[in-house]
Amino acid sequence: MNNIRPHLTMLTEDQTQDIHQYTMKLLATTGVRVDSPSAVEMLTKKVGISNVDGRTVRIPEELVEWALKVAPRQIQIYDRRGNPQFTIGGAEDRTRFGIGVTALYYQEPETDTPVLFQRKHMQDMVRVGNKLPHYDMVSTIGIVRDVPDYLTDLIGSLEHFANGVKPMVLLCSDEHKFDDVLRMFETLHQGDLGDKPFIIPYFNPVSPLVMNEGTVDKMKIAIERGLPVIISNYSLSGATTPITPAGTIAVLLAELLAGLVIGQLYKEGAPMFLGMLPVYLDMKTLLNFYDPQSILVSLACAEMMAHYGIPHCGTSGSGTGWGMDLLAAETYWMNTLMFSLTKGGIAPFVGDTLGSKAISPLTFIYCHEIIDQALRFAGGFQLDDANVGLDEIHKVGPGKGYVSAPTTLKKYKNGYYVSPIFPRWSMEKWIAAGQPPAQKRLSDYGIEFLKDLPVPDDHDELIGKGEEFINSLPVK
Protein backbone atom coordinates (compact mmCIF):
# COMPACT_ATOMS: atom_id res chain seq x y z
CA MET A 1 0.00 0.00 0.00
CA ASN A 2 1.06 3.59 -0.68
CA ASN A 3 0.46 5.57 2.51
CA ILE A 4 0.42 9.35 2.05
CA ARG A 5 1.43 11.01 5.31
CA PRO A 6 2.10 14.66 6.16
CA HIS A 7 5.46 15.56 7.69
CA LEU A 8 6.70 18.72 9.36
CA THR A 9 10.35 19.68 9.13
CA MET A 10 12.18 22.91 9.86
CA LEU A 11 15.97 22.58 9.86
CA THR A 12 18.12 22.09 6.80
CA GLU A 13 21.19 19.89 7.10
CA ASP A 14 23.39 22.99 7.27
CA GLN A 15 21.24 24.54 10.01
CA THR A 16 21.40 21.31 12.00
CA GLN A 17 25.18 21.44 11.81
CA ASP A 18 25.19 25.11 12.79
CA ILE A 19 23.16 24.43 15.94
CA HIS A 20 25.44 21.52 16.79
CA GLN A 21 28.59 23.62 16.40
CA TYR A 22 27.22 26.52 18.45
CA THR A 23 26.42 24.02 21.19
CA MET A 24 29.81 22.31 21.03
CA LYS A 25 31.56 25.68 21.31
CA LEU A 26 29.41 26.60 24.30
CA LEU A 27 30.23 23.34 26.09
CA ALA A 28 33.95 23.58 25.32
CA THR A 29 34.40 27.24 26.30
CA THR A 30 31.70 28.29 28.78
CA GLY A 31 31.03 24.78 30.10
CA VAL A 32 28.43 23.76 32.67
CA ARG A 33 28.40 23.98 36.44
CA VAL A 34 28.19 20.55 38.05
CA ASP A 35 27.12 20.64 41.69
CA SER A 36 27.71 16.95 42.49
CA PRO A 37 31.27 16.47 43.84
CA SER A 38 31.38 12.85 42.73
CA ALA A 39 30.27 13.81 39.21
CA VAL A 40 32.91 16.56 39.04
CA GLU A 41 35.56 14.04 40.07
CA MET A 42 34.35 11.58 37.42
CA LEU A 43 34.32 14.25 34.71
CA THR A 44 37.76 15.55 35.69
CA LYS A 45 39.25 12.16 34.90
CA LYS A 46 37.78 12.37 31.40
CA VAL A 47 38.29 16.03 30.48
CA GLY A 48 41.51 16.76 32.39
CA ILE A 49 42.10 19.18 35.24
CA SER A 50 42.72 22.05 32.79
CA ASN A 51 39.05 21.92 31.77
CA VAL A 52 37.75 22.12 35.35
CA ASP A 53 37.45 25.37 37.27
CA GLY A 54 35.92 24.65 40.65
CA ARG A 55 32.50 23.22 39.79
CA THR A 56 32.55 24.48 36.18
CA VAL A 57 33.44 21.76 33.68
CA ARG A 58 34.24 22.41 30.04
CA ILE A 59 33.30 19.40 27.95
CA PRO A 60 35.23 18.77 24.71
CA GLU A 61 33.45 17.82 21.52
CA GLU A 62 35.06 14.39 21.32
CA LEU A 63 33.51 13.39 24.68
CA VAL A 64 30.08 14.51 23.49
CA GLU A 65 30.53 12.56 20.26
CA TRP A 66 31.45 9.46 22.26
CA ALA A 67 28.31 9.80 24.39
CA LEU A 68 26.14 10.22 21.31
CA LYS A 69 27.70 7.11 19.79
CA VAL A 70 27.21 4.78 22.77
CA ALA A 71 23.73 5.94 23.87
CA PRO A 72 20.93 3.64 22.65
CA ARG A 73 18.98 4.80 19.60
CA GLN A 74 15.88 2.88 20.61
CA ILE A 75 14.21 2.36 23.98
CA GLN A 76 11.60 -0.35 24.56
CA ILE A 77 9.04 0.48 27.24
CA TYR A 78 6.76 -2.04 28.98
CA ASP A 79 3.76 -1.85 31.28
CA ARG A 80 4.16 -2.95 34.89
CA ARG A 81 2.96 -6.46 34.01
CA GLY A 82 5.81 -6.94 31.53
CA ASN A 83 3.89 -6.43 28.30
CA PRO A 84 5.68 -4.43 25.55
CA GLN A 85 3.94 -1.09 25.03
CA PHE A 86 5.99 0.98 22.59
CA THR A 87 9.48 1.57 21.25
CA ILE A 88 10.84 5.09 20.96
CA GLY A 89 13.39 5.63 18.20
CA GLY A 90 13.55 4.32 14.66
CA ALA A 91 11.77 4.95 11.39
CA GLU A 92 8.30 3.87 12.55
CA ASP A 93 8.35 5.91 15.74
CA ARG A 94 5.48 8.29 16.52
CA THR A 95 4.87 10.62 19.42
CA ARG A 96 3.47 8.97 22.54
CA PHE A 97 1.48 11.11 24.96
CA GLY A 98 1.01 10.96 28.72
CA ILE A 99 -0.83 12.85 31.44
CA GLY A 100 0.58 14.49 34.54
CA VAL A 101 2.47 17.53 35.73
CA THR A 102 3.15 17.39 39.54
CA ALA A 103 0.38 19.90 40.19
CA LEU A 104 -0.35 21.51 43.55
CA TYR A 105 -4.07 21.92 42.88
CA TYR A 106 -6.94 19.96 41.35
CA GLN A 107 -9.69 21.74 39.43
CA GLU A 108 -13.10 20.40 40.32
CA PRO A 109 -14.88 19.40 37.08
CA GLU A 110 -18.22 20.89 38.19
CA THR A 111 -16.92 24.43 38.81
CA ASP A 112 -13.23 24.60 37.78
CA THR A 113 -12.48 25.65 41.37
CA PRO A 114 -8.87 24.79 42.36
CA VAL A 115 -8.57 22.74 45.56
CA LEU A 116 -5.46 21.28 47.19
CA PHE A 117 -4.31 18.15 45.35
CA GLN A 118 -5.10 15.11 47.51
CA ARG A 119 -4.45 11.42 47.60
CA LYS A 120 -7.88 10.62 46.13
CA HIS A 121 -7.08 12.89 43.17
CA MET A 122 -3.90 10.96 42.44
CA GLN A 123 -5.86 7.74 42.61
CA ASP A 124 -8.61 8.88 40.26
CA MET A 125 -6.39 10.69 37.76
CA VAL A 126 -4.05 7.71 37.33
CA ARG A 127 -7.16 5.66 36.58
CA VAL A 128 -8.28 8.28 34.03
CA GLY A 129 -4.92 7.98 32.27
CA ASN A 130 -5.24 4.21 32.18
CA LYS A 131 -8.78 4.37 30.82
CA LEU A 132 -8.15 6.72 27.90
CA PRO A 133 -6.41 4.68 25.17
CA HIS A 134 -4.40 7.44 23.44
CA TYR A 135 -2.44 8.12 26.62
CA ASP A 136 0.49 5.75 26.46
CA MET A 137 1.90 6.61 29.89
CA VAL A 138 0.95 8.29 33.15
CA SER A 139 3.33 10.79 34.71
CA THR A 140 3.28 11.87 38.34
CA ILE A 141 -0.03 13.75 38.37
CA GLY A 142 0.39 15.97 41.41
CA ILE A 143 1.98 16.51 44.79
CA VAL A 144 -0.23 14.89 47.43
CA ARG A 145 -0.96 17.53 50.07
CA ASP A 146 -3.29 15.81 52.55
CA VAL A 147 -0.52 13.69 54.08
CA PRO A 148 2.54 14.76 56.13
CA ASP A 149 5.18 16.45 53.97
CA TYR A 150 7.72 13.67 54.46
CA LEU A 151 5.22 11.16 53.02
CA THR A 152 4.18 13.18 49.96
CA ASP A 153 6.40 11.39 47.42
CA LEU A 154 5.95 7.95 48.93
CA ILE A 155 2.15 8.03 49.19
CA GLY A 156 1.76 9.72 45.82
CA SER A 157 4.07 7.23 44.12
CA LEU A 158 2.27 4.31 45.77
CA GLU A 159 -1.07 5.50 44.37
CA HIS A 160 0.62 6.05 41.01
CA PHE A 161 1.89 2.47 41.01
CA ALA A 162 -1.22 0.74 42.34
CA ASN A 163 -3.96 2.42 40.30
CA GLY A 164 -2.79 1.63 36.79
CA VAL A 165 -0.62 -0.63 34.69
CA LYS A 166 0.58 1.77 31.98
CA PRO A 167 4.21 2.95 31.90
CA MET A 168 5.03 5.49 34.60
CA VAL A 169 7.02 8.72 34.28
CA LEU A 170 8.24 9.36 37.81
CA LEU A 171 8.94 12.74 39.40
CA CYS A 172 9.90 13.22 43.05
CA SER A 173 9.56 16.62 44.71
CA ASP A 174 11.95 15.63 47.52
CA GLU A 175 15.22 14.36 46.08
CA HIS A 176 16.02 12.59 49.35
CA LYS A 177 12.99 10.33 48.94
CA PHE A 178 13.85 9.15 45.43
CA ASP A 179 15.78 6.05 46.48
CA ASP A 180 13.05 5.13 49.00
CA VAL A 181 10.44 5.35 46.25
CA LEU A 182 12.42 3.05 43.97
CA ARG A 183 12.99 0.58 46.80
CA MET A 184 9.24 0.59 47.47
CA PHE A 185 8.62 -0.13 43.79
CA GLU A 186 11.10 -3.00 43.91
CA THR A 187 9.22 -4.43 46.88
CA LEU A 188 5.88 -4.14 45.09
CA HIS A 189 7.16 -5.38 41.75
CA GLN A 190 9.10 -8.29 43.23
CA GLY A 191 11.57 -8.13 40.39
CA ASP A 192 14.26 -6.13 38.67
CA LEU A 193 12.85 -2.74 37.65
CA GLY A 194 15.35 -2.51 34.81
CA ASP A 195 14.54 -5.91 33.29
CA LYS A 196 11.39 -4.83 31.43
CA PRO A 197 11.33 -1.15 32.31
CA PHE A 198 7.98 0.52 32.92
CA ILE A 199 9.26 3.30 35.19
CA ILE A 200 10.95 6.30 33.57
CA PRO A 201 12.40 8.75 36.11
CA TYR A 202 12.37 12.39 35.02
CA PHE A 203 15.10 14.91 35.89
CA ASN A 204 15.65 18.63 35.27
CA PRO A 205 18.93 20.48 34.98
CA VAL A 206 18.73 24.09 36.18
CA SER A 207 19.01 26.67 33.44
CA PRO A 208 21.27 28.31 32.63
CA LEU A 209 23.94 25.62 32.40
CA VAL A 210 23.73 24.01 35.85
CA MET A 211 23.68 20.26 36.47
CA ASN A 212 22.37 20.46 40.02
CA GLU A 213 23.40 17.90 42.61
CA GLY A 214 19.92 16.44 43.12
CA THR A 215 19.42 15.83 39.41
CA VAL A 216 22.84 14.29 38.87
CA ASP A 217 22.78 12.04 41.92
CA LYS A 218 19.22 10.82 41.30
CA MET A 219 20.15 10.13 37.70
CA LYS A 220 22.97 7.89 38.92
CA ILE A 221 20.61 5.97 41.22
CA ALA A 222 18.18 5.32 38.35
CA ILE A 223 20.81 4.44 35.76
CA GLU A 224 22.51 1.98 38.10
CA ARG A 225 19.16 0.17 38.34
CA GLY A 226 18.97 -0.09 34.55
CA LEU A 227 16.06 2.33 34.23
CA PRO A 228 15.65 4.60 31.21
CA VAL A 229 15.75 8.25 32.30
CA ILE A 230 14.51 11.55 30.94
CA ILE A 231 16.72 14.64 31.03
CA SER A 232 14.53 17.62 30.23
CA ASN A 233 15.15 21.29 30.92
CA TYR A 234 12.55 23.96 31.66
CA SER A 235 13.51 27.42 30.45
CA LEU A 236 12.17 30.94 30.73
CA SER A 237 13.30 32.71 27.58
CA GLY A 238 14.49 36.17 28.53
CA ALA A 239 15.19 35.09 32.10
CA THR A 240 16.98 31.74 32.45
CA THR A 241 17.87 31.47 28.75
CA PRO A 242 18.41 34.09 26.03
CA ILE A 243 15.24 35.72 24.72
CA THR A 244 16.04 34.63 21.16
CA PRO A 245 14.98 31.12 20.09
CA ALA A 246 18.45 30.49 18.64
CA GLY A 247 20.16 31.38 21.93
CA THR A 248 17.67 29.32 23.91
CA ILE A 249 18.28 26.28 21.71
CA ALA A 250 22.05 26.55 22.19
CA VAL A 251 21.86 26.84 25.99
CA LEU A 252 19.26 24.11 26.46
CA LEU A 253 20.96 21.72 24.06
CA ALA A 254 24.26 22.22 25.88
CA GLU A 255 22.57 21.24 29.16
CA LEU A 256 21.01 18.16 27.59
CA LEU A 257 24.25 16.96 26.03
CA ALA A 258 26.10 17.54 29.31
CA GLY A 259 23.48 15.35 30.99
CA LEU A 260 23.94 12.72 28.28
CA VAL A 261 27.71 12.69 28.85
CA ILE A 262 27.30 12.29 32.60
CA GLY A 263 24.73 9.53 32.16
CA GLN A 264 26.89 7.57 29.74
CA LEU A 265 29.90 7.93 32.03
CA TYR A 266 27.84 6.45 34.83
CA LYS A 267 26.93 3.49 32.64
CA GLU A 268 27.85 3.18 28.99
CA GLY A 269 24.75 2.42 26.95
CA ALA A 270 22.32 3.80 29.55
CA PRO A 271 18.94 4.46 27.85
CA MET A 272 18.17 8.18 27.95
CA PHE A 273 15.51 10.54 26.58
CA LEU A 274 16.47 14.19 26.03
CA GLY A 275 14.11 17.12 25.58
CA MET A 276 13.12 20.70 26.34
CA LEU A 277 10.23 22.60 27.92
CA PRO A 278 10.84 26.06 26.45
CA VAL A 279 8.52 28.85 27.62
CA TYR A 280 8.66 32.62 27.77
CA LEU A 281 8.54 34.91 30.80
CA ASP A 282 6.07 37.79 30.57
CA MET A 283 8.09 40.71 31.93
CA LYS A 284 4.93 42.58 33.00
CA THR A 285 3.14 39.82 34.90
CA LEU A 286 6.14 37.56 35.68
CA LEU A 287 4.10 34.58 34.44
CA ASN A 288 5.37 31.89 32.10
CA PHE A 289 3.57 31.11 28.85
CA TYR A 290 3.92 29.21 25.58
CA ASP A 291 4.48 31.36 22.51
CA PRO A 292 4.37 29.98 18.94
CA GLN A 293 8.15 30.32 18.92
CA SER A 294 8.26 28.01 21.95
CA ILE A 295 6.74 25.40 19.67
CA LEU A 296 9.46 26.11 17.10
CA VAL A 297 12.15 25.53 19.74
CA SER A 298 10.50 22.21 20.60
CA LEU A 299 10.42 21.27 16.93
CA ALA A 300 14.10 22.16 16.55
CA CYS A 301 14.90 19.98 19.57
CA ALA A 302 12.97 17.05 18.09
CA GLU A 303 14.92 17.37 14.85
CA MET A 304 18.26 17.64 16.66
CA MET A 305 17.48 14.49 18.63
CA ALA A 306 16.55 12.71 15.39
CA HIS A 307 19.86 13.88 13.93
CA TYR A 308 21.73 12.56 16.96
CA GLY A 309 19.73 9.33 17.12
CA ILE A 310 18.67 10.05 20.72
CA PRO A 311 15.07 9.31 21.81
CA HIS A 312 13.20 12.57 22.30
CA CYS A 313 11.01 13.87 25.13
CA GLY A 314 8.97 16.92 24.19
CA THR A 315 6.64 19.33 25.91
CA SER A 316 2.88 18.94 25.84
CA GLY A 317 2.52 22.70 25.33
CA SER A 318 0.30 22.95 28.36
CA GLY A 319 -0.29 25.17 31.35
CA THR A 320 -1.67 28.20 29.55
CA GLY A 321 -5.40 27.99 30.26
CA TRP A 322 -7.60 28.76 33.24
CA GLY A 323 -9.04 25.26 32.97
CA MET A 324 -10.03 23.41 29.82
CA ASP A 325 -10.90 26.59 27.96
CA LEU A 326 -10.11 28.38 24.70
CA LEU A 327 -6.73 29.51 26.05
CA ALA A 328 -5.69 25.94 26.77
CA ALA A 329 -7.18 24.54 23.56
CA GLU A 330 -5.22 26.78 21.21
CA THR A 331 -1.86 25.81 22.70
CA TYR A 332 -2.67 22.12 23.05
CA TRP A 333 -3.85 21.93 19.44
CA MET A 334 -0.79 23.69 18.06
CA ASN A 335 1.66 21.65 20.09
CA THR A 336 -0.04 18.27 19.70
CA LEU A 337 -0.42 18.61 15.96
CA MET A 338 3.19 19.74 15.62
CA PHE A 339 4.55 16.74 17.54
CA SER A 340 2.28 14.35 15.68
CA LEU A 341 3.97 15.43 12.46
CA THR A 342 7.57 15.12 13.69
CA LYS A 343 9.90 12.17 14.03
CA GLY A 344 8.43 10.85 17.27
CA GLY A 345 9.30 10.63 20.94
CA ILE A 346 7.26 11.13 24.08
CA ALA A 347 5.23 14.09 25.35
CA PRO A 348 4.40 13.04 28.90
CA PHE A 349 2.80 16.11 30.52
CA VAL A 350 -0.71 16.72 29.23
CA GLY A 351 -3.24 18.23 31.61
CA ASP A 352 -1.89 21.19 33.53
CA THR A 353 -3.61 24.55 33.79
CA LEU A 354 -3.20 27.89 35.57
CA GLY A 355 0.52 28.21 34.97
CA SER A 356 1.10 24.50 35.69
CA LYS A 357 -0.07 24.88 39.30
CA ALA A 358 -3.23 22.84 38.72
CA ILE A 359 -4.56 19.93 36.72
CA SER A 360 -8.05 19.44 35.41
CA PRO A 361 -9.65 16.09 34.58
CA LEU A 362 -11.57 17.90 31.85
CA THR A 363 -8.24 18.83 30.27
CA PHE A 364 -7.20 15.19 30.29
CA ILE A 365 -10.46 14.24 28.59
CA TYR A 366 -10.55 17.04 26.00
CA CYS A 367 -6.87 16.67 25.11
CA HIS A 368 -7.51 13.00 24.44
CA GLU A 369 -9.86 14.24 21.70
CA ILE A 370 -7.11 16.48 20.34
CA ILE A 371 -4.59 13.62 20.31
CA ASP A 372 -7.10 11.30 18.64
CA GLN A 373 -7.68 13.77 15.81
CA ALA A 374 -4.01 14.78 15.51
CA LEU A 375 -2.95 11.14 15.15
CA ARG A 376 -5.68 10.64 12.59
CA PHE A 377 -4.35 13.63 10.64
CA ALA A 378 -0.74 12.45 10.93
CA GLY A 379 -1.71 8.95 9.80
CA GLY A 380 -2.54 10.25 6.33
CA PHE A 381 -4.45 8.07 3.90
CA GLN A 382 -3.91 5.21 1.48
CA LEU A 383 -3.40 5.80 -2.24
CA ASP A 384 -3.89 2.60 -4.26
CA ASP A 385 -6.32 0.94 -6.62
CA ALA A 386 -8.67 -0.24 -3.88
CA ASN A 387 -8.87 3.13 -2.16
CA VAL A 388 -9.31 5.14 -5.35
CA GLY A 389 -11.96 2.68 -6.54
CA LEU A 390 -12.15 3.59 -10.23
CA ASP A 391 -14.49 0.66 -10.94
CA GLU A 392 -16.96 1.88 -8.30
CA ILE A 393 -16.74 5.47 -9.55
CA HIS A 394 -17.45 4.17 -13.06
CA LYS A 395 -20.50 2.20 -11.86
CA VAL A 396 -21.96 5.19 -10.00
CA GLY A 397 -21.32 7.42 -12.98
CA PRO A 398 -21.91 11.15 -13.41
CA GLY A 399 -24.61 12.95 -11.46
CA LYS A 400 -25.31 10.18 -8.93
CA GLY A 401 -24.31 9.77 -5.27
CA TYR A 402 -22.26 7.39 -3.14
CA VAL A 403 -24.53 6.98 -0.10
CA SER A 404 -25.37 3.38 -1.00
CA ALA A 405 -22.06 2.55 -2.71
CA PRO A 406 -20.45 -0.65 -1.35
CA THR A 407 -17.37 1.15 -0.06
CA THR A 408 -19.52 3.74 1.76
CA LEU A 409 -21.61 1.03 3.41
CA LYS A 410 -18.45 -0.79 4.45
CA LYS A 411 -16.51 2.17 5.80
CA TYR A 412 -18.90 4.89 6.93
CA LYS A 413 -18.84 3.89 10.59
CA ASN A 414 -15.11 4.52 10.88
CA GLY A 415 -14.46 6.61 7.79
CA TYR A 416 -14.45 9.90 9.67
CA TYR A 417 -13.99 11.23 13.17
CA VAL A 418 -16.88 11.02 15.63
CA SER A 419 -16.52 12.73 19.00
CA PRO A 420 -17.83 10.94 22.09
CA ILE A 421 -18.33 14.36 23.72
CA PHE A 422 -19.72 16.78 21.16
CA PRO A 423 -22.66 15.64 18.99
CA ARG A 424 -23.05 16.96 15.45
CA TRP A 425 -26.28 18.82 16.06
CA SER A 426 -28.14 20.97 13.61
CA MET A 427 -28.95 24.50 14.73
CA GLU A 428 -32.52 23.41 15.42
CA LYS A 429 -31.50 20.50 17.61
CA TRP A 430 -29.01 22.66 19.52
CA ILE A 431 -31.71 25.24 20.23
CA ALA A 432 -34.13 22.51 21.28
CA ALA A 433 -31.51 21.18 23.71
CA GLY A 434 -31.38 24.58 25.43
CA GLN A 435 -28.39 26.02 23.55
CA PRO A 436 -25.78 24.34 25.78
CA PRO A 437 -22.24 25.82 25.62
CA ALA A 438 -19.59 23.36 24.49
CA GLN A 439 -17.94 23.78 27.89
CA LYS A 440 -21.13 22.48 29.55
CA ARG A 441 -21.15 19.41 27.32
CA LEU A 442 -17.52 18.70 28.25
CA SER A 443 -18.22 19.16 31.95
CA ASP A 444 -21.28 16.89 31.91
CA TYR A 445 -19.40 14.22 29.95
CA GLY A 446 -16.37 14.47 32.25
CA ILE A 447 -18.42 14.12 35.43
CA GLU A 448 -20.05 10.95 34.10
CA PHE A 449 -16.71 9.64 32.83
CA LEU A 450 -15.19 9.94 36.30
CA LYS A 451 -17.90 7.74 37.79
CA ASP A 452 -16.58 4.63 36.04
CA LEU A 453 -12.80 4.34 36.34
CA PRO A 454 -10.93 1.02 36.09
CA VAL A 455 -9.29 -0.39 39.20
CA PRO A 456 -6.43 -2.90 38.72
CA ASP A 457 -7.22 -6.27 40.27
CA ASP A 458 -4.09 -6.13 42.44
CA HIS A 459 -4.80 -2.61 43.74
CA ASP A 460 -5.67 -3.52 47.34
CA GLU A 461 -2.72 -5.89 47.67
CA LEU A 462 -0.28 -3.28 46.37
CA ILE A 463 -1.64 -0.54 48.61
CA GLY A 464 -1.32 -2.83 51.63
CA LYS A 465 2.27 -3.83 50.82
CA GLY A 466 3.21 -0.26 49.99
CA GLU A 467 1.84 1.16 53.22
CA GLU A 468 3.64 -1.58 55.15
CA PHE A 469 6.91 -0.59 53.45
CA ILE A 470 6.33 3.12 54.15
CA ASN A 471 5.55 2.44 57.81
CA SER A 472 8.83 0.53 58.13
CA LEU A 473 10.89 3.58 57.14
CA PRO A 474 12.33 5.89 59.78
CA VAL A 475 10.52 9.19 60.06
CA LYS A 476 12.69 11.91 58.55
Image: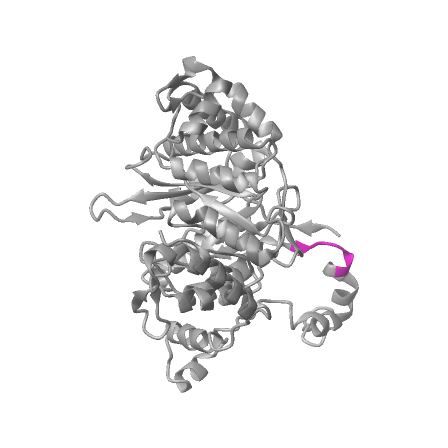
Quarter of the view holding residue 113: bottom left
Q: Is residue 275 visible?
A: no
- Please provide percent x and percent y for residue 127: 51, 67
Image-based side of 136 in relation to 40, left or right: right
Residue beneath the point at 34% across and 33% down: 208
Q: Nearer the viewer, residue 182 or 327?
A: 182
Q: Is residue 280 visible?
A: yes
Image-based side of 362 in relation to 401, left or right: left
Residue numbers of the magenta segment: 381-386
In the picture as drawn, the residue positioned furthest to the bottom comes out as 432
In the picture as drawn, the residue positioned furthest to the top comes out as 50
- Please provide percent x and percent y for residue 82: 66, 56
Residue beneath the point at 43% across and 32% down: 255
Residue beneath the point at 38% across and 50% down: 173
Image-based side of 152 in relation to 399, left or right: left
Residue beneath the point at 56% across and 38% down: 224
- Please provide percent x and percent y for residue 449: 48, 75
- Please provide percent x and percent y for residue 183: 52, 50
Quarter of the view holding residue 234: top left
Q: Is residue 462 magenta?
A: no
Q: Nearer the viewer, residue 283 or 56?
A: 56
Image vertical order of residue 268 relative to residue 469, above or below? above
